[in-house]
Amino acid sequence: MDTAPARSARVDRGELAIVVGAALVSFGVAATILATGDFGREATRLALRTTARLSFVYFMLAFLATPLGRLRPGPASRWLVRRRRAFGVAFGASMTIHVGCILRLYALYAPDRPPMVTNADFLIGIPGLTLVGLMTITSAIAIRRRIPPNAWKRLHTTGLYAVWSIFFLCLVDSVSRKETDHPITAYYAFIAVLLTAMGLRVTARISQQRSRESEAIARH
C-alpha cells in the first residue's frame, strides 16, 4: 500500500493545526484584552502591542528554521524546518489580527490620527504589511506552483529580511520615542533576539559556503 498520500495528509493537518492555533491564540488574546480593558484606547494599544509580540514569535520560528537546521541538525531542528512554511503563514494570520487592532485604534481616534503613529510608521509599515500579505498568499501551494521558482524565492527572501528590518527599526525607534517601566522586556530583549537570529543566519550561510568549497576541492 502506498503510504505517501497518508503521510502528506498528516503534514497538511500538522501545518493547519499550527496556523489555526496561532491565529486563535492571537485573536483570543486580543479579544480578551479588548473585552476586559477599562478604557477603549488603552486596551486597544495593549492588544496592538501584544499581537505584535505574538507575531514576532511566529516570525522568528520561521526565520530561524533554516539556520538551525544547518548548524544544529537534529529531530527538533528538522521538525522546525518542515514546519517553517506553517509558521510563516501563522505570522501572516497573526499580523492580520494586528492590523485589525490598528484599524480599531484609528476608529477610536477618528477623525484625528493616533498620537503615537508617526510618518515613519507609514513609510515602514505599509510596504512591510504589503510584503507580509504577498508572502502569506504565495505560501499556498496552489499559488506557489503558478509562480516561477526564482521569482518566488526572491519575493520570500526579500520579504524575510525586510520584515526582520522592520521589527528592528520599530524597536529601536520605540526605545528613543516611547516610555516604559520595563524597557528590557519591552524592547531590548527583542532587539537582542533579532541580532542573535541574524547572526545565526549569517553563520549558517558562511558554513554552507565553506562546505560547498570543500566539496569542490575534494572533487578536484
Image (cartoon, helix red, strand yellow):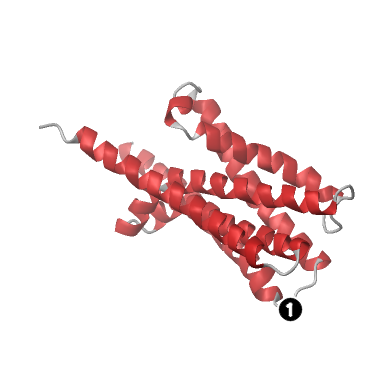
**Total label count?**
1
Q: Residue at x 74, y 41 (%)?
A: 126
Name the outermost residue toward the bottom.
181
Q: Give the x, y percent position of residue 69.
A: 39, 52
Q: Give the x, y percent position of residue 160.
A: 58, 44
Tell me if residue 47 comes above or below residue 1 in the rendering. Answer: below
Q: Nearer the viewer, residue 38 or 15?
A: 38
Q: Residue at x 83, y 59 (%)?
A: 116
Tell me if residue 35 comes above or below residue 16 in the rendering. Answer: below
At label 1, the amino acid type is Asp
Tell me if residue 23 comes above or below residue 141 in the rendering. Answer: below
Q: Give the x, y percent position of residue 18.
A: 42, 50
Tell me if residue 44 comes above or below residue 66 in the rendering. Answer: below
- Judged left or right of residue 201, residue 72 is left
Q: Give the x, y percent position of residue 133.
A: 61, 37
For the question of whether residue 203 can be seen, the reply is: no
Name the outermost residue toward the left.
1
Image quadrant in which you'd find residue 218: top left
The quadrant of the image that shows the N terminus is top left
Image quadrant in which you'd find residue 73: bottom left
Name the outermost residue toward the right.
112
For the question of whether residue 128 can be seen, the reply is: yes
Q: Residue at x 57, y 54 (%)?
A: 55
> To which residue does mark 1 refer?
181
Describe the element under mark 1 as helix, strand or loop.
loop
The quadrant of the image that shows the C terminus is top left
Mark 1 crowd level (few <14, some 14–19, many ≥20, 10 Å Cα): few
